[in-house]
Amino acid sequence: MKKIVSALVLTTMLFAQTKTVVIKIEGMTCPLCTTAIKKSLKNTKGIIKAKVRLNTQKAKVIYNDSKVTKNAILNAIQKAGYSGKIILTY
């Protein structure tokens, strides 16, 4: 029983640290833009998954909030040469 409780506590802690942000990105004009942004995001420690869509001009980023801040995520987008604004967090 102790092992089950410990596993549940650990799982809850891991999921509690995982957050998602949706970011509106300015300046994307082609598929290479999305590739550059995705590469910069994935090279940022603490980002678990990044999906960048040209047609919506948005990025959806799943990250560990104990390892990376929202500002660091925006800085990764800026490092790729684009500007972003967080429009949704969950």
Image: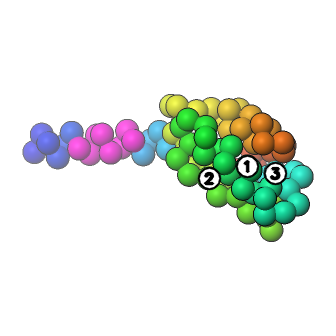
Question: Compared with residue 11, is residue 79 higher up or lower down, i.e. above or below?
Answer: above
Q: Nearer the viewer, residue 30 or 84?
A: 30
Question: Would residue 89 be seen by someone viewing this image from the given angle?
Answer: no
The Cα–Cα distance between marks 2 and 3, rounded to whole angstroms, is 13 Å
Q: Mark 2 or mark 1, which has the lower sequence index?
A: 1
Q: Position of residue 28 (x, y in %)?
A: 85, 56
Label 3: how many Cα within 10 Å (few below 14, some 14–19, many 20+): many
Tag 3 secondary structure? strand
| Front position among marks 2 and 1 | 1
What span is colored magenta in the figure?
7-14
Q: Are marks 2 and 1 in contact (CB under 8 Å)?
A: yes
Residues tagged 2 and 3 counted as in contact (Cβ below 8 A): no
Residue 36 coordinates in the image, percent (x, y): 74, 50
Q: Which residue is mark 2?
A: 50
Q: Hey, what amino acid is under mark 1?
A: Ile
Please state which amino acid type lies under the numbered disc 3.
Answer: Ile
